[in-house]
Image (cartoon, rainbow, N blue to C red):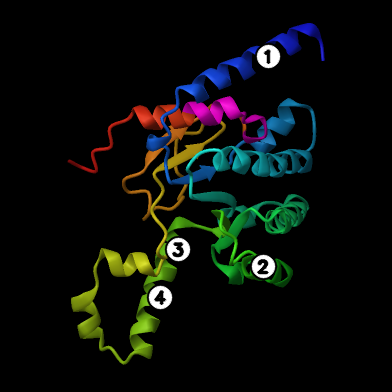
Amino acid sequence: MNLRDKLRGLLVRLYARRVEGHLDHAQVPKHIGVIMDGNRRWAKAAGSTTVHGHRAGAEKIEEFLGWCSETDVEVVTLWLLSTDNFDRPQDELGPLLGIIEDVVRTLAADGRWRVHHVGTPDLLPSGMQRTLKEAEEATARVDGIVVNVAIGYGGRQEIADAVRSMLLDAQDKGVSMEDLAESVDIDMIGRHLYTGAQPDPDLVIRTSGEQRLSGFMLWQTAHSEYYFCEVFWPAFRKVDFLRALRDYAARHRRYGG
């Protein structure tokens, strides 16, 4: 690292401390959703491989959660693999699944996070299904940030699964379709989502400069604030995180009013 890079790094750290010092912890979002985008483009810009980009993105996760633990964040949802990602070439998808499985094991072994899977298990290899189940069981009593790992996740699929779950639940209880139709409301559907009784995301961060949700938590983000960051996920820094929190705190949430 040359002198110029050292000075730049020092200035960024000093700026981050300044932003953090002015951060109002009373205005910190309780639930943050993260669309971790840009691994492949980061790797390409660095002249490296796609697999290296995914590994670099995976390594950023624990660092990000550490920043969250320094605030009053209670829930973090990480979108690790979408239902659309299964259309990627096998030579990319295979290593990616392995990297994601390692992420889940690492989060469970850390001891600070309560891991919860959101997504359709049936889409995943049996080995990953076991890893997710073991991670949830091993961290069930952890008194820390709830980390939703969105793997095999799609927003439309989640809503379809919620409706299916609601219908099956009514059938098990002997509720007629007529009575169910009369009682269906927003809260009932919400209880059958992957996130169940969790609070909806207050803030959704998407890296890489893309300004769309791509189907991320379509139901839960109806009143969320969005923060779009130009930096690719592997290069996401604490100062970028703090800027997102500062931007969120400065907004006046109207909830349609």
Q: N-terminal of the two: label 2 or label 3?
A: 2
In front: label 4 or label 1: 1
Pointer 3 residue? 158
In front: label 2 or label 4: 2
Disc marking residue 138: 2
Disc marking residue 164: 4
Amino acid type assigned to the residue bearing label 3 in the image: Glu
Element under disc 4: helix
Q: Are marks 2 and 1 in contact (CB under 8 Å)?
A: no
- Using the image as rendered, state which of residue 132 and residue 25 is in the foreground: 25
Q: Magenta part of the protein: which range?
A: 233-243
Q: Position of residue 47 (x, y in %)?
A: 79, 27
Residue drawn at 33 percent across, 68 percent down: 189
> Spatial distance from mark 2 to mark 1, Cα to Cα?
39 Å
Element under disc 3: helix
Element under disc 2: helix
Q: Which residue in the rendered view is the most extreme toward the top?
A: 4
- Using the image as rendered, state which of residue 83 and residue 182 is in the foreground: 182
Q: Are marks 2 and 3 in contact (CB under 8 Å)?
A: no
Disc marking residue 10: 1
In front: label 2 or label 3: 2
- Using the image as rendered, state which of residue 204 and residue 216 is in the foreground: 204
Q: N-terminal of the two: label 3 or label 4?
A: 3
Q: N-terminal of the two: label 2 or label 1?
A: 1
Residue drawn at 56 percent across, 38 percent down: 70
